[in-house]
Amino acid sequence: MCQDDSCCRVCSRGLYSCHWKHSSIPKTKHACCWFSVVTLVSLLSLCWMYICMVTFNDQEDVNWEGFTRLKRWVNWFMVMIIISAVLTSYCVLLLLFALVQVALREPLNLHWLHKIFLFFGVIFVAFGVTGFCLKWQREWPTVPLSLQATAPFLQFGAVGALTLLSLFVFQGFDMAEKKWSKFLIAGIFVVLSAAIFLCPLSIQSPCLIEAKELPEKPKLIGHRGAPMLAPENTMMSFNRSIACGVTAFETDVQLSKDRVPFLMHDNNAGFLLRTTNVKEKFPNENFSHSANLTWKELQSLNAGEWFLKTDPFRSVSKLSKEEVKTARHQTIPSLLQLLNLAKQHNISVIFDLYSNNQENDTVDTVKTILHSGIDPKLVLWLPPAEREYVNKTAPDFIQVYDNESVMLKEGGNHLNVKYSTFSTENISNNWPNKSVTVNMWVVNERWLFSLLWCAGASSVTTNSCHLLKDMERPDGVMAPLTYRIIWITVDIASILIMTGLYIFEWKTHCFCKRKGTERQRNETAAWNEKELSPFLSTG
């Protein structure tokens, strides 16, 4: 090898240790410990990034929590995603530079600045995990659920990473001077390899299924209409969802001071702040309940301008000029307006009823529905409080439950649950003959929709109906036999490649050792000749 540092050597050493000029740098204490820290923090950041990506489906929950605390709508989840992506990229690149240092047999002297950044990275991830544990506990089931969709492909990636990293492991094994070090390296590597190679034995995914056994595509229910294409809970939003082929409108109902049911999700203190210009219209008022305003006052509020200003789904740029103009002039609709639209297009309606007086508000809501002339079978009644009264007054309403045990007790057959609280096994095993209709909310991402499709969900409530409507087949579907063949082929190929890399490393190590021995022998012979030459010349 030439004496001048190669470009690769200089870059890796400079970026990892901040020593750019020469390689004659003594190895610092605890260098191997810091290498282990870099490895662990890289794995930690990758796991955290994975959690962020699979919980992206529920970004609204995080943003809503931020809004309730700060009374300001910001896409906090996207901020977290960006910071997490920067942290993960930094840690992985640092690990790659460390591995290059190992391959080039350079000293692993981690610069103090990197140590500080790693510390802050661990703090950031710790705060993120703590936040999820304290405020968004119901998001954690999404992680194991996501593994049903991603585990087969993550295993292929893990095998590839193991194969690439094996050369560095073999180098470390050959460089280890003590026997116990060699046994430790070999033991950890063998156990890790076996776990990665054999983990498909424990992988269970509903999408490992024969194409002919694939269930019917779940129907789409527009969550507050089509909130990615128009301001939520406005007539524009529900009209946009019709183009997606939704079978039901999902909305939220409250009653005004003069007993008119209207559509609005946010409730209680500051319920109009996020989606209307109530601060401009009533600057000195602090409305805490829907009954604080008359229907005329509610109609005077703008319910579309906020959507153009905050761009909650980063979709405003995709709207045409006409659509932007329409969105800007949206107002709060009444329940009657939505029922007329649903009746016109033969689309069902399902809603939550937010009220401090469930008895009276239920009576007025049912009265409004019956007077609208809509087919009662298009009404999916979800509010549980006055279900007995609703059954007597409007027996043709379809009763929908959010609790499986209550549904079975009352003889119902329509279930509406959050996707993360209901296992995919329950769908396929408990009701294989579709005796119960299962709707999952809120499902926005393709991987999640694909997983629930494979599991046999009847329908999903979604913000992204315009994206899911075009899916003709679930993502990641494979026949079980096809997956087993790919799994075994990938494992065998990896083992063969790693065997070749080990032989190459062993021969290289032996060659270098032999060259070193010959060099030492030549140097000894030269020294002997130099020392003995005076005596030989005298003789």
Image (tube, rainbow, N blue to C red):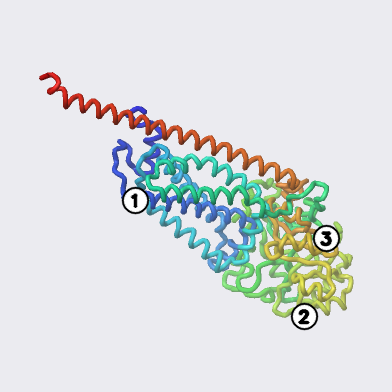
**Position of 482 relative to 409 (above/below):** above
Q: CA distance from mark 3 to mark 1?
A: 59 Å
Q: Mark 2 falls on what kind of element?
A: helix
Front residue (pair 529, 163): 529
Classify residue 272 as left or right of residue 371.
left
Q: Which mark is residue 112?
A: 1
Quarter-of-image position of residue 364? bottom right
Which image quarter is the C terminus in? top left
Please name the residue shown 50% across and 35% down the image.
503
Please name the residue shown 86% across and 58% down the image.
346
Q: Of the residues under marks 3 and 2, which one precedes in the sequence? A: 2
Q: Residues within 10 Å of mark 1 (few under 14, many from 20)?
A: few
**Dots 3, 1 in contact, CB < 8 A:** no
Quarter-of-image position of residue 289? bottom right
Residue that label 3 marks: 432
Front residue (pair 434, 120): 434
Name which residue type carries label 3: Pro
Residue 306: percent from left, percent from top: 62, 58
Which image quarter is the N terminus in? top left
Closer to viewer: mark 1 or mark 2 = 1
Q: Mark 3 falls on what kind of element?
A: loop
Q: Of the residues under marks 3 and 1, which one precedes in the sequence? A: 1
**Position of 271 relative to 359 (above/below):** above
Name which residue type carries label 2: Asn
Name which residue type carries label 1: Trp
Q: Of the residues under marks 1 and 2, which one precedes in the sequence? A: 1
Residue that label 2 marks: 360
Q: CA distance from mark 1 to mark 2?
A: 67 Å
Q: Mark 1 falls on what kind of element?
A: helix
**Position of 368 relative to 39 (above/below):** below
